Amino acid sequence: MCGIVGYIGPNQAAPFLIEGLTKLEYRGYDSAGIAVFDGEKINVEKSVGRLGALTQIIEQKQPQGCLGIGHTRWATHGRPSDANSHPHTDCTGKFVVVHNGIIENYMTLKEKLIAKGHIFKSETDTEVVAHLFEESYEGDFEAAVKKVLAQIEGSYALVFMTQLEPDKIICTKQDNPLVIGLGQGENFIASDIPAIINRTRKTYILSDGEMAIVTKDSVWVQNRQGVPVTKKVFEVNWDAEAAEKGGYEHFMIKEIYEQPKAIRETLTGRFNKDDSAVVFETLKWTKEELLKIKKIAIVACGTAYHAGIVGKYYLENLARIPVEVDVASEFRYRSPLIDEETLTIVVSQSGETLDTLAGLKEAKRLGSKTLAVTNVVGSSIAREADQVIYTWAGPEIAVASTKAYTTQLIVMFLFGLYMAGIREMLPKERIKELIAGARNLPAQAHELLENVDPIKTFAQKYGFNEDVFFIGRALDYCVALEGSLKLKEISYIHAEAYAAGELKHGTLALIIEGVPVIALATQEDVYEKTLSNIKEVKARDAVVIGIALEGDDQIDKYVDHAIHIPRADKYLAPILAVIPLQLLAYYAAKTRGCDVDKPRNLAKSVTVE
Ligand code: M6R
């Protein structure tokens, strides 16, 4: 996730660009830059670090000009650095772009452009767009942009400008947001409404495939086929704070709703051409090196630890390799049996959790290979590990982790499949089937999020209970752990997760009339056994909410309420099953009047022991 802005009008562009980027910093904050046309040429200023670093440069240099674009970055391709910051330019500096998203086929395009003599200055996927823009320009800005769009694949919001036609900016989008703010004799472009809300409340919200030609007095929109589109003006009536949350009441619910996109981005570029194998471009270990791994240790905290537990299932079941999972704060104090034949995977959204970082250092000291699964490019954990696989969830602001968890599961699943391929543990057909299933997940998550009313009702009904139990078997148990943590941390309800088969070894004593039990039953291999456990708690008069697959009518006979999730393979069901639990926690916390985004005593990133 990155933030982009653009300005064309009679006023100086730089003040709006900086103001807009400040409002978009929540979308990315590892580097920033602006490009302003001074009447003769385009001047680009950019800097690694928070926006403050760029602001200082702009205060000193005072770039002059009434046409400009800007960007605040959340690194994906290429670490945070001055060179990798946007805007990106072609070889001549006359063609400039800013981009939010991922250009999937950038490597192929880059090779072709290099062969034609183009010189690249950064490691980003975006720079290919600037060079393609130069290559495609034959005296017609609009035609050049269309030629560029015909060649790129992936997700994007893109803003183009060229000093050869400085009376306009052209912008377009596919799977990433873009709005145009309509002013009087001036127009604004931004990734999101907070950036423009102080300047205008009249906007056009671009749809996928639309391209807008923006001058100071007009905005002309056409679709992918070049057919003009009559846009409806969307009048923003949110206050500035609500606008930062995209109109949602809390960051947590906004991030829950961002999951289809986060999942899609995390899957992007991670399969070979015929979807028969997982590829990790960034992993530099050879097949021989990977085959030497005899054991995997997963180390993480909190939600990331729960993703690690799911990872153990994936790696052991798909790749048939032994896995241990440790809470990071315990790992280094238990003399773990780690050596050069071990791969240690550390999982951390922030990449800064002190215990996880210390676990990583300990694993390295013991000679283990190390792999970080993190959401933050250039974070301490990303820098310290031998290799990194990123989750492309975008910045997560709410303390309660949601989209980071689902994308961590995606990465663990992909890595399980990858290792299964290397170790030849799964037939190609099964790998293909699982990849096809993974590709369905964004749409399925979207479908789930369309129908949340029953979950709201349960949360309102049971939100005042002081104890809630979560039960499940196999992967359902792993998800139960995460569901229980979510409920505890934001609603302060006492919640416990149990392996359903373990109930009768003690916990059943706590099940009395009216106690809510959330029973996950998505795993077909253990389904009948889970039903027996549901019957056990029902016999003690618990109120049972079942989470089951679509088409499972049997469950409705045994539970008080059933939530059906879209049908998915047993390995993929956890990625969907957790979503109702996140929503349940969210609405329960709201019912109880809790501060959802900032739960008591907790911080987003724990950098103390
Ligand atoms: O940034 P990390 O993934 O390393 O953070 C680990 C935990 O602190 C984090 O997952 C925490 O448990 C969340 N608040 C849970 O929602």
Image (cartoon, rainbow, N blue to C red):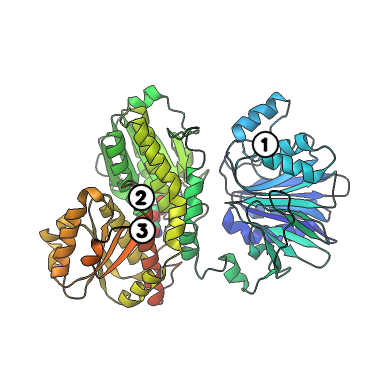
**Mark closest to the chain's N terminus, 2 or 1:** 1
142, 475: nearer the viewer:
142
Q: Position of residue 34 (x, y in %)?
A: 73, 50
Mark 2, secondary structure of its residue? loop
Identified at 27% across, 61% down, the residue is 553
**311 horizontally vs 595: left or right:** left
How many numbered marks does the figure carry? 3
Q: What type is the residue that disc 2 sits on?
A: Ala
Q: How far apart are marks 3 and 2 (CA)?
A: 8 Å
Vertical placement of residue 65 versus 534, above or below: above
Identified at 69% across, 32% down, the residue is 120
Q: How far apart are marks 2 and 1 (CA)?
A: 37 Å
The answer to whether the residue labelled 3 contacts the one labelled 2, judged by CB atoms less than 8 Å apart, is: yes
**56 horizontally vs 553: left or right:** right
**Pointer 1: residues within 10 angstroms few (<14), some, or many (20+)?**
many
Q: What type is the residue that disc 3 sits on?
A: Ile
Q: What type is the residue that disc 1 sits on?
A: Val
Residue 57 appears in the picture as rendered: no
In the picture of the structure, the residue carrying the numbered disc 2 is 568
Q: Position of residue 71 (x, y in %)?
A: 67, 51
Identified at 41% across, 55% down, the residue is 606
In the picture of the structure, the residue carrying the numbered disc 1 is 128
298, 226: nearer the viewer:
226
**Pointer 2: residues within 10 angstroms few (<14), some, or many (20+)?**
many
Mark 3, secondary structure of its residue? strand
The answer to whether the residue labelled 1 contacts the one labelled 3, judged by CB atoms less than 8 Å apart, is: no
**Pointer 3: residues within 10 angstroms few (<14), some, or many (20+)?**
many
In the picture of the structure, the residue carrying the numbered disc 3 is 565
552, 394: nearer the viewer:
552
Mark 1, secondary structure of its residue? helix
